[in-house]
Amino acid sequence: MSVFEWPVRVYYEDTDAGGVVYYANYLRYLERARTEWLRHLGFEQDRLMRDVGIVFAVRRVEIDYLLPARFDDALTVEAAVETVGKVALTFRQAITRAPDSLLSRALVQVVCLDRSRFRPTAIPAEIREMMYAEQ
Amino acid sequence: MSVFEWPVRVYYEDTDAGGVVYYANYLRYLERARTEWLRHLGFEQDRLMRDVGIVFAVRRVEIDYLLPARFDDALTVEAAVETVGKVALTFRQAITRAPDSLLSRALVQVVCLDRSRFRPTAIPAEIREMMYAEQ
Amino acid sequence: MSVFEWPVRVYYEDTDAGGVVYYANYLRYLERARTEWLRHLGFEQDRLMRDVGIVFAVRRVEIDYLLPARFDDALTVEAAVETVGKVALTFRQAITRAPDSLLSRALVQVVCLDRSRFRPTAIPAEIREMMYAEQ
Amino acid sequence: MSVFEWPVRVYYEDTDAGGVVYYANYLRYLERARTEWLRHLGFEQDRLMRDVGIVFAVRRVEIDYLLPARFDDALTVEAAVETVGKVALTFRQAITRAPDSLLSRALVQVVCLDRSRFRPTAIPAEIREMMYAEQ
């Protein structure tokens, strides 16, 4: 399984009065890595929306918060495809801080939607093949 | 000048590691009051977008941060129309905390845009008349 | 099991370019309901932090996104305590839209932390008893 | 006047249902550039807070929204020090998109605060000298 990595810096905007990254913002970090992984495969989501008429929407998230991330931390967000189906795929993701802290791990199920009706539709074959190759 | 007031509660999501509301989030609060003011006039923005084909977009903000808002604070956000032009209007806004703290004041210029081309367009007469009446 | 309900209005700030509420923002809504539930039991989190020296931190979230929430929607967020342990409690939550749409359901595990060391600590007896009574 | 530049990619989290970057989020981008400029001068804000006991807080923002930023845009955020006083400094900032679009320009006044009392305090001499040199 190929693991894609994306660096994320923690800014003030991400933290809360507890002094740590607000729990919902981990989901932003996870999505940045998935977006950059798609871009790395050659797919820009704005073009997929406009030209192909599809969007990828999150259907389910399971996330564990193990250690807090703090202001100014330099984090690494991982994304690896676990399964690819006809209309959905599942990512195994993690957020780590060097040298060896695992801050969070997550399982994210994403479904391909027809942009106009917002209904599930088949992932285009070209994209699915690239995704398979990344598993 | 009629002043519209809208209550806002500060949640963790709004604060940052400095223990206070993050400066960009004051702009969220200001917009909630403008949205509710429009609703109070009888205009739902989703219907304006869909049926009339217009959106209101912010063109300029001047904001002063006088005192910090903190987690769990119960705030009041004020919105008053200062000027209404053909395509734009200006709000004078304030964020206060009882009994007598002025936390922030702002001047916000909003412009009416054609939804599809994202270009300035005239505020529909019916809406402009209601806005005038509120001045 | 007693179910606490809290109203949430969807503003522009909550939506994304897909025209629906951004997936991370559902976690904000869920937390607002948990915060208001604690307040309804008589506990203000800022006082718990300052006077008792504890904070409640999310340890795990499982969330299903069933239907999208849209700009201007009036939502109801539910929070019900499913289990209360010595240091942690689990909420069963849902986000609904009248008359009968279930948009999202979630299971959220929250742990009581010593504020200064950020380590798990026992939920104060007075609070735990109130929580039990709400189950 | 030396101009510091920082790249920012627009993600879904930044956009709203209008299809463009939500107006409050421009203030996040502006702050990222100021934070990275401070880091480039050799000052980490978490260390300034912990070791020196100061935080920089925004006192006033004037921002013009000229053109919308969209999902997937690769932006450049500029920060240049315009004036440095004893306790405050003013940044002239801009957000641009290649090849030649000016999306937003802003004037941001930042004040140095004593961390514990949240009151204005003198910018430490060492930092102020570095800031002068960057003008």
Image: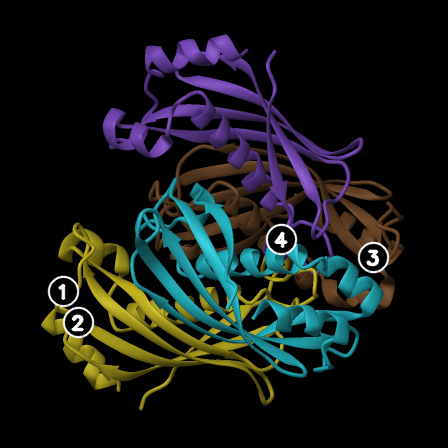
Chain colours: A cyan, B brown, C yellow, D purple
Label 4 vs label 2, nearer the camera: 4
The answer to whether dots 3 and 2 both sit on one chain is no
Give the secondary structure at mark 2. Answer: loop
- Which amino acid is tagged 4? Tyr
Marks 4 and 2: CB-CB under 8 Å?
no
Please provide percent x and percent y for residue A103.
34, 58
Please provide percent x and percent y for residue B110.
73, 44
Q: Is residue A82 visible?
A: yes
Front residue of this view, candidates B108 and D83: D83
Residue drawn 42% across and 24% down?
A: D111
The chain ID associated with circle 2 is C
Give the secondary structure at mark 4. Answer: loop
The residue to which callout 1 is attached is C121
Q: Earlier in the sequence, mark 2 or mark 1?
A: 2
Q: CA distance from mark 3 to mark 2?
A: 51 Å
Residue drawn 64% across and 46% down?
A: D23
Give the secondary structure at mark 3. Answer: strand
Disc marking residue C87: 2
The answer to whether dots 1 and 4 both sit on one chain is no
Q: CA distance from mark 1 to mark 4?
A: 37 Å
Q: CA distance from mark 2 to mark 1?
A: 6 Å
Please provide percent x and percent y for residue D75.
68, 39
Marks 2 and 1: CB-CB under 8 Å?
yes
Q: Is residue B106 left or right of residue D129?
A: right
Q: Is residue B42 visible?
A: no
Please provide percent x and percent y for residue B56.
76, 51
Among the 4 quarters of the image, the one containing residue C38: bottom left
The chain ID associated with circle 3 is B
Q: Residues within 10 Å of mark 3 (few under 14, many from 20)?
A: many
The residue to which callout 4 is attached is D11
Q: Can you name the residue that lies furthest to the left here?
A: C125
Q: Is residue D9 left or right of residue C7?
A: right
